[in-house]
Amino acid sequence: MSAGEGGLDVPRAAGVELEGVTKSFGPNLALDGLSLDVPAGEFLVLLGPSGCGKTTVLRLVAGLEEPTRGVVRIGDQVMNGVDPKERDVAMVFQSYALYPHLSVRRNIEFPLRSRHVDARERMRLVAEVSSALQIGSLLDRKPAEISGGQRQRVALARAIVRRPRVFLMDEPLSNLDAQLRVEMRAELVELHQRLGSTILYVTHDQVEAMTMGDRIAIMNHGVLQQVDTPEKVHDRPANAFVAGFIGSPPMNILAGVVEPVTGDTAPARSPTPADRSVGGTDAGALVSVGMPGGSIPLGGPLAEAVLSRGLASVIVGVRPEHVSIDPAGSLAASVTLVESLGHERHVVCRLEAGQLVVARLAAREAVPRTGERVSLSFSAEHLQLFEPDTEARIDV
Amino acid sequence: MAAESHPGYGMRSHRSTLLRRLLRYVLLVATALVVAFPIYITVVNALLTPQQIAARPPTLFPLHPHWGAFASAFSTGHLGIFLRNSLIVTVTITLAELVTSALAGYAFAFVRFPFRRTVFFLCIATLMIPMEVTLVPNRETIVALGWFNSFPALIVPFLASGFGTFLFRQAFLGMPGDLRDAAALDGYGHWRFMTRVVLPMNRPVIGAFAVFAFLSAWNQYLWPLVVTETNGVRTVQIGLRQLQALSIDQTNIIFAGTVLAALPIFVILVVFQKQLVRGLTAGALKG
Amino acid sequence: MSDTRRRRRLGEAALGYVFVLPALAVFGVFVFYPLVKTFVLGFYRTPPFPNLPSHFVGLSQYGSVLTSPAFLDSLWRTVLFVLFTVPLGIALGVALALLAHQRLAGIRIFRTIFSSTVATSVAVASVIFYTLLNPEVGLLSYWLGGRGGAGILQSPTLALPAVSVVTIWQNLGFVFILMSAALQSIPDDLMDAARVDGSSMWYRFWHVTLPLLSPTVFFAVVVGTIGSFQAFGQIDLLTQGGPNNHTDVLIYSLYQQAFVFNNTGVAAVMSVLLFAILLLLTAVQFRFFERRVFYGR
């Protein structure tokens, strides 16, 4: 079989494509019309809360489940109805799924023996992969006799050893302790660069997603929300869900009422002095977005977009690093909690109606005390607006 | 092009999985028929007349069931007395084994006393000495005690269980160690700790063992056979032995009696399925 | 100070003995005492007529019984019976468990049916088959083509296999439940991994499923063997050891020696041998448990 061709460093990757894939388990819809195109050699991270259907995507690509509707392709071949063993993919499970009765060597050999690779070739491949992953000294042990991190490596070795066209990884690092997880993250990225293989990687950890993925596919309730590079997903989230899911602490999401600013009429509840407020000067403001505790004047293309869509309300998103505590700010709030992380501080403020807004301040900045009344201002160019009903981003 | 190739592919895989699924059902149904046939035919024959049972080709569906065989099983076969005896014996044994095993299991797990390991070893050793081995002297003991052909003969030798003691001790030891300390801080003595913490927490194991003990006691055959001689104290398993000896023109009564003898256990199987499975697998899956 | 502590320790010890006393009393009277007595009884030859004193013959009775052709025949038949019932019974149980271990609608009904024979006792199963195998009215003997002729249970060659079949059927529910539970304890991930790793169904069964089932299979072999050595009810109800002693297994001949021929001495010797066999098997089982407990931690 092809398993023996070439060494570790010969790329043989294939793209993966899902087209309108729906998967239901009885009455439960796990995936709803999902389309996703993963080019050969890409490291794509599937990110989402638990139960969002990301693991189902892996199982569909692996052939462990068949789609209810839609097509799954690997390397341009339709895979529907094709047995897992014919798909030439490898999967790394969250539980590692090592065979407890077999030695590490036999575990790694398992896919080769299943495919009747001859003994000499097996020896060579196992030696190669186990030295690459530094588990050469463990080959005669049983899975129960090695540590969690070592098991993780064995699971990886078993996937790598037969050079599959696609790697599927289901939260492979989630059972490791924090320090090991950071190490393995770097190692996996390096491995990907070396192998040049296609990797579909499922996680619910956004740090893993941001640091490892070429692109991130964010899912919620079986629906794909956005597929883009880590930067784009962070800076230009496609909708309020993505905005709220990415970033730590997450983006502040607030409901706002749109009031057009006409001529010299000042916004009804605008605090003073208004001339330094967020959306530029008051003179340039086209709309004001009212929120409990005050309102933000808004000008420029973003305001025009809101006006041209005729929206009466919007969802406002602002990242904590773009919130500042500013005596000239337009929103009144009180400080409920100050968390210090050493290099930075998170100030949790409560608006009048009770919503929480988090501001992220550098450690050197002066910080208000708990209970203190403050004014907040938002950095205008980083403000994100979303449609009130679809929650989709309002683009300019 | 891809879109065109898709429906055909989908259909084919759909059809093949459907066929595979159908095949599995056929296999399942065929196997189920073979496994369940003896039980099924027993129930059917209990509802037929002896002539219908003997008739060929055989009747496999009782279109006009006759219920008389059940009444005859009670009158001719004395099933009522046998069932009553079995119930008395089995319930007493089950309750007694629960109590003695829980007490001993608790002592081995939590109470410090001299020679605890030795005594525990003796309890476990009983697992290696089944009733069949000690049949002859045990019967002499029963006769010497004047218990021959009486309920104590059927009950007293089974008032304790090595298996139950072992099972409970293991389960009790498996509880978090902090519990005993927490209870001690609350001022609980052994009795209150046992009745308010240990036993309530171990209800699953206790339930599983109860079902297991009931089943074992109900199904006993050899011992009741050698220590009883009259219907007044004989259990239903021995009752079946007498029933089997009925003549060929009373086969429907034999079948009806068999149904009645198995019925209590069937009810238990249905009602306590979870406990039964746990009880039966306790030996295999518990260390 | 130390006085109260000692009193408390004494109280604790007393409580411990109170708790274990009921169990110990029962075991003492009905397990340990009769076990010793069995050995002793084997030293005495039972007189040919009741009420005569039995006399001490030492080990000679052990020797004569253990070398008598009747005893050896009976032992051999018991071994045969074990060989008929245990491997086939377990293979069928595993097969049923695999068959019922699928995600299919209505699978619970099949699971219930497959475990249903747990509800039958040895006596129930035996009476059912005895009647179904009756040469004159039995449905099974009709289907097997034996109407009016010699019945299966009356055939020297077929009687033991027939008793074995009844035993296998009666135990099938238990083995099924055991194997199903073991099968369910295998993580789904393992089977999924094996599928993605490119193995066929056959390869998966031999290299993943069966090795992981093997502790349970071993347990079933030991328990089944012990059970078959103790099998009495089915012999008593189906064949009474016949025809011509062809189903006269160890425990049945023990029963006959003790309660039909009133030959207590010979029965005691047989008991001792039965004990030795069961002890060996149970010891194997215990060793295996120790290993499993160790393995699990």
Image (cartoon, coloured by chain):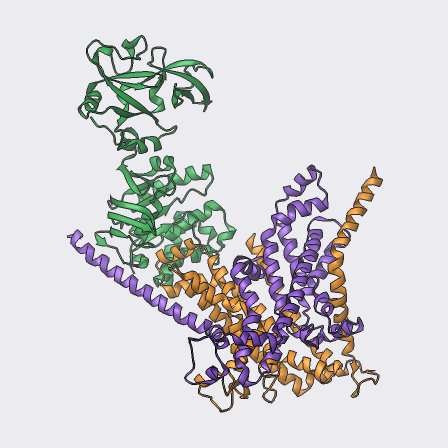
| Viewer-closest of A229 and B238 | B238
| Viewer-closest of A97 and B77 | B77
Along the horizontal axis of the image, is A154 left or right of A379?
right
Along the horizontal axis of the image, is C279 left or right of A358?
right
How many numbered tags mark residues here? 0
Give the x, y percent position of residue B49. 49, 80
| Viewer-closest of B211 and A194 | B211
* Residue depicted at x 29% and y 56%: A87
* As drawn, B262 above or below C269: above
Q: Quadrant of the C terminus of chain B?
A: bottom right
Give the x, y percent position of residue B27. 38, 69
Q: Which chain is purple?
A: B
In which image quadrant can residue C142 be found?
Answer: bottom left
Chain A: colour as depicted: green
Along the horizontal axis of the image, is B269 left or right of A120?
right
* Residue depicted at x 58% and y 76%: B73
Residue A196 visible, this orientation: no
Chain C: colour as depicted: orange
